[in-house]
Image: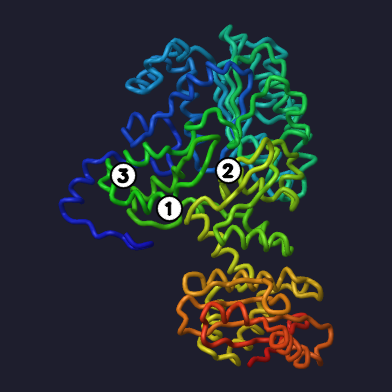
Amino acid sequence: MKDGKLKELTGKEVEEMRDKKPLPIGIDDFKTIIEEDYYYADKTKMIESLLDDGAGVTLFTRPRRFGKTLNMSMLNYFFNLKNKEENRKLFENLYISKSKYMNQQGEYPVIYLSFKDIKALNWEKCYFMTKRLITYLYNEFEFLREKLNKKDLSDFDKVWLDEEGADWENSLKNLLRYLYEYYNKKVVVLIDEYDAPLVSAYHNKYYEKAKDFFKTFYSSVLKDNPYLQMGVMTGIIRVIKAGIFSDLNNLNTYTILSDFYPNCYGLTEEEVKKSLIDYNLEYEMGDVKDWYDGYRFGKSEVYNPWSILNFLHAKELRAYWVDTSGNDLINDVLKIVRKDIIRDLKKLFDGEGLKQNLSGTSDLSRLLSEEEIWELMLFSGYLTVEEKIDEDYYILRLPNKEVRRLFKRTFIEKYFGRGNKLIDLMEALTENRIEDYEETLQDILLKSVSYNDTKKGNEAFYHGFILGMSLYLEGEYIVKSNIESGLGRYDVSIEPKNKNKRGYILEFKATDNVDKLEEISKEALKQIEEGKYSSTLRQTNTKEILYLGIAFCGKQIKVSYK
């Protein structure tokens, strides 16, 4: 199947599809999936692993849409004493049903709380949404009121009814005690996407207020709590030194760098092969691997489950996972117009690995900054580990075609704006319409680029243009930058793979005097000639080479050519 081409189904294939299990796209409730017989890859071994582990509190960090919420729902139905016998049926014929730990099914009261939707522009709104979430939780346990003493009843009602004097910071801790005293059983606490409000707070500059609240809210429940049987948390990143879990001594954290729980999130190659066979798509395995494989969790290689489910449904090779959010992280990276960032992006686009020091224990305020942007990209699923060099050093790369295309699209939009501006620019160049090339480049600068990006001395911006060229021309041309040739280093070389096509040498120069633009552009042209920059390109048997000297002054340009 070609990229983006939908396969035409025959009548027989349509009939066969009617016999297939429905696909649980967007369904995170374990009970619904099992009872309505949706397609499901058995992940119940995770329950056995958790109980073998015996940790008081466990934190799993994985990218979005890799099964975190579904697994938390599974744990809820397994441990929850509510509807014990009914829920037991959900696990028939699954791995856990044959485990010695089946005797733990339905044995505990469970608090299940998800913060995935707690994202707000300011602390007031975040606080309001958090309180509303807690009141809904208390409403679920309204029956506890019948056995509470007068003081506890008053405290319960203040939270439940959102009244003045409610102790919100300790509301979860208090609920644990109420449940323990009601059932005389310790409580299992499940907190999904614990970091969502904290990341939102950081992006919107109210992190300190959010941190102060959630530090007490989480730690009061999870640290030295005699009523806690087990705590399980999920998120995308680990917030450690920021104070949230700084004094939590019973916490086991498993990131994508950990060798434990490798196959609990994402789909293994065996699971993907089986799904393709089940949906009569086994012939697509090679393309599916190129598009959606490539993630490494510990020592295991896994596929993106969201993309696989959508591919099984649509039978079309395209980006699914990257379209499920605003991809703010990639935009954040591309906002950093810095030479080393552009250089690293070029390496990634060229299929090279990126050597990085990864601690896995970064403070949130650092992890969301320029200094550790690649570590954040890794934990968020936009990069993957190619190789572990030693304890802290790893080689990172783009995992697959899906993510690569997102980077490409976002980068081009950042530097060249939406629409066909880059197409127009590159076609004008390769068709030798240099006046049109100059006009289009000038238009891009005026409409799509910040003045700060083009200020004198900011070489990174021009390197961004080089990268944009290489992304558009890949396949037909080889674009290189800052390579020694002849008597110096050229800025850009564009080598045609078809030697009957024209090659190009580009030299950039900046000036702070708009009246000198033409003079400076001709100096750049002269530099190409005198430096014999074309010598390397000529060795590739490129027959015709065009020289371009491009002078910049803020948002104004002049192109000279020969």
* Closer-to-camera residue (195/171): 195
**Amino acid tagged 1:** Asp
Which mark's residue is nearer the viewer, 3 or 2?
2
| 351 lies above or below 106 | below
Answer few, some or many: residues within 10 Å of disc 3's Cα (few below 14, many 20 plus, some between 14 and 19). Answer: some
User: Is 38 left or right of 479, judged from the image as shown?
Assistant: left
First in sequence: mark 3 vs mark 2: 3
First in sequence: mark 2 vs mark 1: 1
Q: How is the image coloured?
A: rainbow
Residue ID for mark 3: 276
Q: Is residue 341 visible?
A: yes
User: Is 71 left or right of 32, judged from the image as shown?
Assistant: right
Quarter occupied by the C terminus = bottom right
User: Is 99 left or right of 335, judged from the image as shown?
Assistant: left
- Distance between the Cα atoms at labels 1 and 3? 15 Å
Residue 549 in which image quadrant: bottom right
First in sequence: mark 1 vs mark 3: 3
* Circle 3: element type: helix
Answer few, some or many: residues within 10 Å of disc 1's Cα (few below 14, many 20 plus, some between 14 and 19). Answer: some
User: Is 416 left or right of 265, judged from the image as shown?
Assistant: right
Quarter occupied by the N terminus = bottom left
Percent of width and height locating residue 81: 48, 15
Residue ID for mark 2: 387
**Residue in view at x 48 percent, y 19 percent:** 48
Percent of width and height locating residue 116: 59, 40
**Residue in view at x 62 percent, y 9 percent:** 181
Residue ID for mark 1: 290
